[in-house]
Image (cartoon, grey):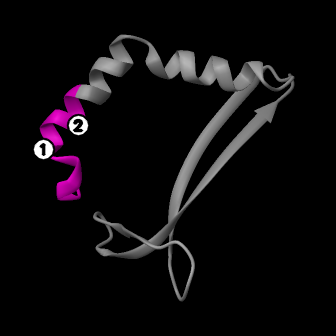
Amino acid sequence: MPIKYRSYKTTWRRIKRWQDERVWDRILRALASIRSCEISAVDSSTVEAKGGGVVGYDGLKHKKCSKIHVANNYKV
């Protein structure tokens, strides 16, 4: 984890607290409310960065990369 995010333990506790307080549910409900859908799925991945553009660092893969976010909305 990059040092700018401080201790991984603090980050883990914060994410756990958000989960316990149902913050993620509220975020997904808010996203779903702006679209006409019944189910939403959010995912992200990193891809190796070769060249210009926005480049970050993936601490897990230990290389420069770009982040891709995808939100899919489904009607059932």
Residue type at mark 2 is: Thr
Q: Is residue 22 above or below residue 61?
A: above
Rendered image quadrant of residue 4: bottom left
Q: What x and y, as percent, mark residue 69?
A: 60, 52
* 71 horizontally vs 46: left or right: right
Position of residue 34 measured from the top left corner of the image (x, y, whole percent)? 78, 24
Please name the predominant secondary structure of the magenta segment in the image. Answer: helix
Please give left or right for residue 76 compared with residue 72 in the image: right
Residue wearing tag 1 = 7
* Tag 2 residue: 11
Q: Which amino acid lies under the numbered mark 1 shown in the image of this protein?
A: Ser
Tag 1 and tag 2, C-beta contact below 8 Å: yes
Instruction: Give the x, y percent position of residue 55.
Output: 47, 73
Q: Is label 2 in a helix, a strand or a loop? A: helix
Question: The C terminus lies in which quarter of the figure?
Answer: top right
Percent x, y of residue 74: 81, 31
Q: Is residue 11 magenta?
A: yes
Which residue is at a point 55% across and 85% down the rendered structure image?
A: 52
Local crowd at mark 2 within 10 Å, few (<14), some, or many (≥20)?
few
The foreground one among 1 and 40 is: 1
Q: Which residue range is magenta in the image?
A: 1-13
Residue at the image point whose x is 87% and y is 23% from the top: 36
